[in-house]
Image: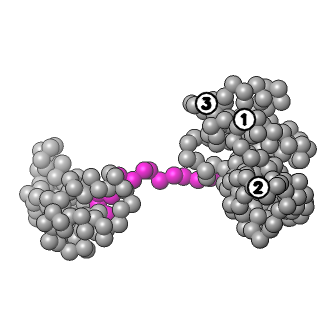
Amino acid sequence: MLEVEKWAEIRKMSRVDGLSQREISRRCGLNRRTNQASARGNGSPGLQPQEFRSLEARPFRDEIGHLLEENPILSGVRVLEEIRTLGYTGGKSILNEHLREIRPRYQPPPRTYQRTTYRPGELAQIDLMELRDQVPVGHGQSRKAYLLTLELPFSKKLSAELIFAKRFEDISFGISSCLIQIGCLPKKLVLDREAALHKGGGKPTDPFAAYLGQLNLGWVILAARDAEAKGALERNHRFIHGNFEAGRRFANPADFRHQLDLWLGRTNNRKHRTANR
């Protein structure tokens, strides 16, 4: 079968460049009969069966487009249910063929990844995770609590501090405690757009900027909804939920801190295949 690219080239030479069939045959290495058929025909080779089979879905192209615009990953089954009510009588295989053709237009471009390497003391990633269970605070009371976590990507060393609110005062206390635990001051902090720290446009709030300035710390505020940029900490949050928090009981915040210190001591002594200490 004639390749689509060659077919298009023949039609261009015939209809646009005005070359003779003999000259086209000389350039393409094909016989005149093939050239004439390519220049006169209306259907492209290799695409005719698909175009013919998807004809039944074409009257519903706009409605399918609206559905995919609202939800690019909407399943073919759901699309079929919606357009059946509008009179579509074709089969699901025809619809799937049509969806394969147009769905990529409504999906975001694929993201590329590369391996990242770090220098010692270059970065520290920080994040907040909400604990699944409330922490007892005395007199039969308990409160919703968070762990502020900090990790050095180079050595994989992890630190954490218990806080009870997302105010700047609480978060800055947590950061300071984590820096004291790891015993070093990195060049930059990497963080997401926490409201108490980020004022918009990738810029820190004034209190947070003053805090960073006092410590001579740089910062990297990540784009919105970009949790994968802090992949190391996101994995550790799942690890903390399952390996530390699950199945434990805490009498009060001091007991929580004691158990957390013991757990972090064991965790930071683990040997990571990719870690450099």
Task: Determine which residue is flagged by label 3.
Answer: 199
Element on which disc 1 rests: helix
Near-viewer residue (92 or 1): 92
Residues 133 and 204: in front is 133
Nearest-to-viewer mark from 3 and 1: 1
| Relative to 196, 240 lies left or right | right
Q: Secondary structure at mark 3?
A: strand
Residue at x 26% of width, y 54% of height = 65
The mark closer to the camera, 3 or 2, is 2
Residue with the mark numbered 2: 141
| Camera-nearest residue between 222 and 39 | 222
Q: Is residue 33 visible?
A: yes
Q: Residue 272: x percent and y percent?
A: 81, 63
Q: Is residue 76 left or right of residue 113?
A: left
In the rendered image, the vertical position of residue 109 relative to residue 238, given as above or below: above
Measured Cα–Cα span from mark 3 to mark 2: 34 Å
Q: Amino acid at mark 1?
A: Phe
First in residue order: circle 3 vs circle 2: 2
Contact between labelled residues 1 and 3, with CB atoms less than 8 Å apart = no
- The residue located at (12%, 47%) in the rendering is 15
Q: Which residues fall within the magenta stretch?
A: 100-115
Please tell me the numbered disc located at residue 19: none
